[in-house]
Amino acid sequence: MTNRIKQRLKEGKAVVNGWLAIPSGFSAEVMAQSGWDSVTVDMQHGVQDYLSMVACFHGMGAQPVTPLVRVPWNEPGIIGKALDGGAWGVICPMVNNKDEAKRLADACLYPPAGKRSNGPIRAGVYGVSTSYQKIANDEVLVIPMIETQEAIDNIDAILDVPGISGIYIGPSDLGFSLGMEPKLDREEPKILGIYEMLLAATKKRGLFAGLHNGSAGYAARMIKMGFRFVTVANDSGLMAQAARAAVNEVRKGAGAVAQ
């Protein structure tokens, strides 16, 4: 089996990624039916743990989406377990320099490329015509998050670490680290300039840049800017938006009696 979104990225196509904060296999199943190219279980800020991640992967299994995970931190134990559990890519927060990028790559890749321990308890079933261990290093995506000025300053060294597939920008923490309000869908000229610089650095190396977005419209705009991996909000946020819109539509349509 090949990593479908890795193939899309090789072809220069954009990946539209869903995000799971809710620890529910049923929620994951519903999201996976919605047309995303990949769906990421958020173990950092979502209400997810390892068992709920596996349940979410189960829920996605019947759909042609690629399961990814954002791990809580750059720690080889949870990174290895997430990959063994079926993730085809790891998004890792707060990677700020070459050494931290190397630790991430080492945790994601089997020897001799890395130091990942063998034991793909769920992932192994995906190796159909060949063993999982033989294809994993070629198929797993290794994605450090760029969220600080230190990471920006070290971007060339981070991207030059063997095994790194691309980057994923966290706009809230990036802005926070620069003394700005933590939020998505940023319009500050300084931030947009940083985006342009990061896009150029990844493109020069044949890698991709990803971004977390608050709205579909902004995500589409960022694809046109050059991003090839975009996330739109998360499952709980999209549910809340749809619910509020439905309630407001009823109240507006029904008039004073529903106010």
Image (cartoon, grey):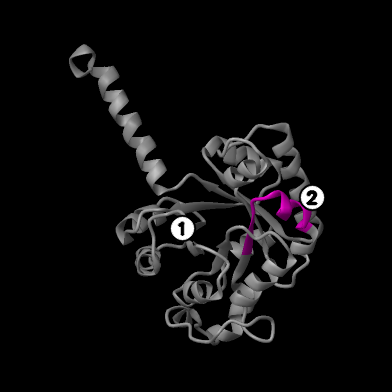
Q: Is residue 70 above or below residue 245?
A: below
Asked which secondary structure carries label 2, the reply is helix
Picture coordinates of residue 197, whole percent (x, y): 78, 46
Residue 117 is situated, as x and y percent measured from the top left of the image, at: 55, 85
In magenta, the rendered stretch is: 143-155
Q: Quadrant of residue 142?
A: bottom right
Task: Report the side of 63 relative to 230 (left or right).
Answer: left
Whether the magenta-drawn stretch holds residue 198 is answered as no
Which residue is found at the position 40% from the left and 48% from the top?
235
Disc sitting over residue 42 in the figure: 1
Amino acid under disc 1: Asp
Name the kind of residue labelled 2 in the image. Ala
Q: Position of residue 31 (x, y in %)?
A: 39, 53
Q: Position of residue 172 (x, y in %)?
A: 57, 43
Closer-to-camera residue (1/19): 19
- Left or right of 122? Residue 5 is right
* Drawn side of residue 47 relative to residue 142, left or right: left
Q: Which is nearer the eye, 140 or 106?
A: 106
Q: Earlier in the sequence, mark 2 or mark 1?
A: 1
Outermost residue, front side: 179
Residues under labels 2 and 1: Cα distance?
27 Å
Asked whether residue 107 appears in the rendered view, the answer is yes
Q: What residue do we see at 59% from left, 75% from top?
A: 108
Q: Element under label 1?
A: strand
Q: Nearer the viewer, residue 56 or 171?
A: 171
**Which residue in the structure is indicated by mark 2?**
200
* Residue count near mark 1 (Cα–Cα under 10 Å), binned few <14, some 14–19, many ≥20: many
Q: Residues within 10 Å of mark 2 (few under 14, many from 20)?
A: some
Left/right placement of residue 199 relative to residue 93 reads right
Instruction: Please identify the quarter of the rendering in which residue 107 is found.
Output: bottom right
| Residue 154 inside the magenta-drawn segment | yes
Q: Which residue occupies 31% across, 30% down?
A: 246
